[in-house]
Amino acid sequence: MRIRIISAVLAVPLFLFVVMKKGIILDISIAILALIAISEFYNAFKNMDIFPSMSISVFSIIFMFIINLKSITIEMIMVWFFINMLLILISNLFKKEFDILSLSITAMGTYYIVFFMYHIVFIAHHYKYSQLIWMIFIVAWATDTFAYFTGYFLGSRKLCPKISPKKTVEGAIGGILGSVIISSIFAYYVVPEILYHCILIGFLGSILGQLGDLTASIFKRYTGIKDFGKIMPGHGGILDRFDSILFTAPAVYYYIVLFIK
């Protein structure tokens, strides 16, 4: 617990600085985090003699970084999708043996980690509601915190015992309520004109964030690991800390695009 607290104390100021500065600092930071996270993800599968293509994913991160230096357009994102999938599909042409499983994990890692994570940057670049980047982390971490304590004190019914034995139905509900409460407080002081939207984001984002947490747990159980990495002592790897954020970031972004005028 001591190591966990020290790690958090050191990481929080750096996190606050990066998110507040936004711009190129945030862009570079997300690229680095995506690189570390996808390396952790692929290393987990190497335990099963599955070897995804790190070079393709590195290219996808660099390409996405370049795209975001200019205005983000649907057309450029479609080009990104096309080129990545093209590289994944044709890479087997240059190997002595076909390895469809490794290529499948390459595709999954590229879209699950790189594309999902870059929604943080999409929101930061939004012309009007870039401040809602905070909602990504508020929803994810409020959900985790309230779910933990609600589950600890009130939890009795298991949520998904085969995936994550410690999670409870009561904890999941507490996480949703906590996310809605903290999101409401944030909106009241920062963006009061869209208070009700933020309440809905807190609700929907919390559900998706918990699904993201469970999804990461499935991968860890499948590959037989406890944590994806050790870069943050007491917390695991980058992917262990961002598992729910990978789902909340797209939720916040698409809510802004579709429902906030």
Image (tube, rainbow, N blue to C red):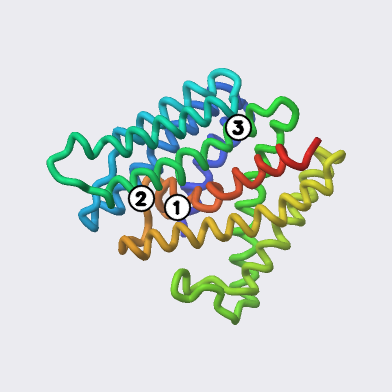
Residue found at the far left of this picture:
96
Q: Nearer the viewer, residue 53 or 201?
A: 53
Secondary structure under tag 3 reads helix
Q: Type of residue at label 2? A: Gly
Instruction: Give the mark toward the camera: 1 or 3.
Output: 3
| Residue found at the far right of this picture | 193
What residue did someone put label 2 on? 229
Q: Are marks 1 and 3 in contact (CB under 8 Å)?
A: no
State the SS at label 2: loop
**Residue bearing the label numbered 1:** 240
Q: Specify the amino acid type for callout 1.
A: Asp
Q: What element does badge 1 sit on?
A: helix
Marks 1 and 3, how far apart in space?
Answer: 22 Å
Report the residue marked by disc 3.
122
Q: Residues within 10 Å of mark 3 (few under 14, many from 20)?
A: some
The x, y position of residue 101, in whole percent, is 28, 52
Indicate left or right for 52 with 233 as reference.
left
Disc with the residue nearer the chain's start (1 vs 2): 2
